[in-house]
């Protein structure tokens, strides 16, 4: 049996602002249905994750905290 691919790095925290997992960049819905979707769709989502994470959590992101400001 072939192992199902997953971007999970076991840092499972959903960001309140973006709705994305801070570890892998998937949405709650993607995480919930991950093992029920076809491998091709998982691969497509995984290909999008680096850009999704960059946009959501980079310093240029509207969701990123201002430098020097703590929550």
Image (spheres, helix red, strand yellow):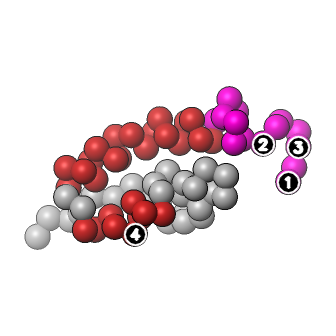
- Between marks 4 and 3 in the image, the one whose residue lies nearer the viewer: 4
| Residue 68 shows in the view | yes
3D distance between C-alphas at marks 2 and 1: 8 Å
Left or right? Give the position of 10 relative to 18.
left
Circle 4 or circle 1, nearest the eye: 4
Q: Are marks 2 and 1 in contact (CB under 8 Å)?
A: yes
Magenta-highlighted residues: 58-71
* Cα–Cα gap, marks 4 and 3: 33 Å
Crowding at mark 4 (Cα within 10 Å: few <14, some 14-19, many 20+): few
Neighbours of disc 2 within 10 Å: few (<14), some (14-19), many (20+):
some
Q: Which residue is mark 4?
A: 32
- Residue ID for mark 2: 65
The image shows residue 11 at horizontal and vertical percentages of: 55, 63
Q: Label 1: which residue?
A: 71
Left or right: residue 9 versus residue 44 is right
Q: Residue at x 34, y 67 (%)?
A: 33
Q: Secondary structure at mark 4?
A: helix
Q: Earlier in the sequence, mark 4 or mark 1?
A: 4
Q: Main secondary structure of the magenta part?
A: loop
Q: Residue furthest left?
A: 1
């Amino acid at each position: 049996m072939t192992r199902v691919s997953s971007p999970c790095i076991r840092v499972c925290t959903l960001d309140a602002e973006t709705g994305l997992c801070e570890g892998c960049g998937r949405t709650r819905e993607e995480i919930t249905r991950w093992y029920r979707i076809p491998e091709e769709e998982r691969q497509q989502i995984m290909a999008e994750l680096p850009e999704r994470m960059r946009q959501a959590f980079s310093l240029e992101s509207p969701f990123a905290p201002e430098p020097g400001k703590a929550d």
